[in-house]
Amino acid sequence: MSDPTDPPKSHGRLSISASVRPRELMQASPRLKGAWAARIITLFPEAFPGTLGLSLTGKAHEMGLWALETIDLRSFGLGRHRNVDDTPAGGGAGLVLRPDVVAAALDQAAIGAPVDRAAWPLIYLSPRGRRFDQAMARHWAQAQGITLLCGRFEGVDERVLEAYGVEEVSLGDFVLTGGEIAAQAMLDATVRLIPNVLGNEASTQEESFSTGLLEFPQYTRPALWHDHPVPPVLLSGNHGEIAKWRLAQAEAITKARRPDLWAEYEAGKG
Ligand code: SAH
């Protein structure tokens, strides 16, 4: 094992420079120094920050606009082998995460966090949960931080979810192998809504879902690509006409692709 204080290696086959910086930042993230914070309980801390360490979310993380702390579920495991799971009561395939082990990790995550769940949601990533959406991302971004419990195997013993009042949230109607990818997806959607994370704040107000509509189509240079021109109105310089065109496009796309969103939008207009 390399000493974590070793300087990052930048050359050679065993180069670890790509992952060292984000992980150092992650471990150094101070608890509750005011920045929005995510605490992630996982058997695979090495999966973080993952894509959250890149681009705008990564830069914002480096700047301290949000903090990321992983809590290694394995470290609360029992016995010499640090067991975290056991066979399902009642029989059946797979393994279930033990309530005592998960509870110890939840207790660790609760240290210094507000008890009020609106100020600090406590979430278990689960296909049985309420479906994640933009409104949820907005609420989470307005909290002080969040704790996300990533399951593995068959999931988590029901008793600990009940005892701690853990809310279940799903990424969608499919089954992942673990909660880590779901956690990253939800954090990405949330963190970009934290003030100053995106360079241009207006971009979160106009994009899909924020207005109740899917976004209008986007174009860039060249003005003529093969025989496909950019719609002339966008090059007209007439901002009123451009806004009208974009709204009409957004409405048409939403109506065609998402009758559910369209019905809500129509009801909201009335
Ligand atoms: N036996 C469970 C699935 C377990 S999948 C069931 O049928 O409901 C293993 C873990 O992956 C879960 O504990 C959960 O944390 C995560 N996971 C799987 N699908 C997910 C989804 N759609 N959204 C969020 N997390 C999910």
Image (tube, rainbow, N blue to C red):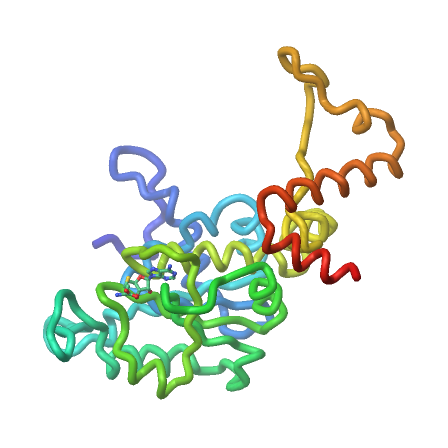
- Quadrant in which residue 91 is drawn: bottom left
- Report which quarter residue 144 is drawn in: bottom right
Could you say where residue 35 lies in the image, as x and y percent from the top left? 58, 68
**Percent position of residue 112, x then y:** 49, 82
Please state the total of marks drawn on the protein image: 0
- Check the image and report above or below for 17 versus 224: below
Q: Position of residue 92 (x, y in %)?
A: 12, 69
Which residue: 57% across, 79% down? 118
Residue shown at 51% from the left, 86% from the top: 115
The quadrant the C terminus occupies is bottom right
Q: Is residue 211 left or right of residue 89?
A: right
- Report the side of 238 relative to 189 (left or right): right
Q: Position of residue 117 (x, y in %)?
A: 52, 81
Q: Quadrant of ligand 1?
A: bottom left
Q: Nearer the viewer, residue 62 or 114?
A: 114
- Depicted 69 relative to depicted 116: above or below: above
Above or below for 16 versus 104: above
Which residue is at a point 65% across and 45% down the rendered structure image?
Answer: 255
Q: Nearer the viewer, residue 64 or 81?
A: 81
**In percent of the image, x 72 and y 22: which residue is there?**
230
Q: Nearer the viewer, residue 209 or 146?
A: 209
Q: Is residue 153 left or right of residue 36?
A: left
- Answer left or right for 144 relative to 132: right
Quarter of the figure that contains the N terminus: bottom left
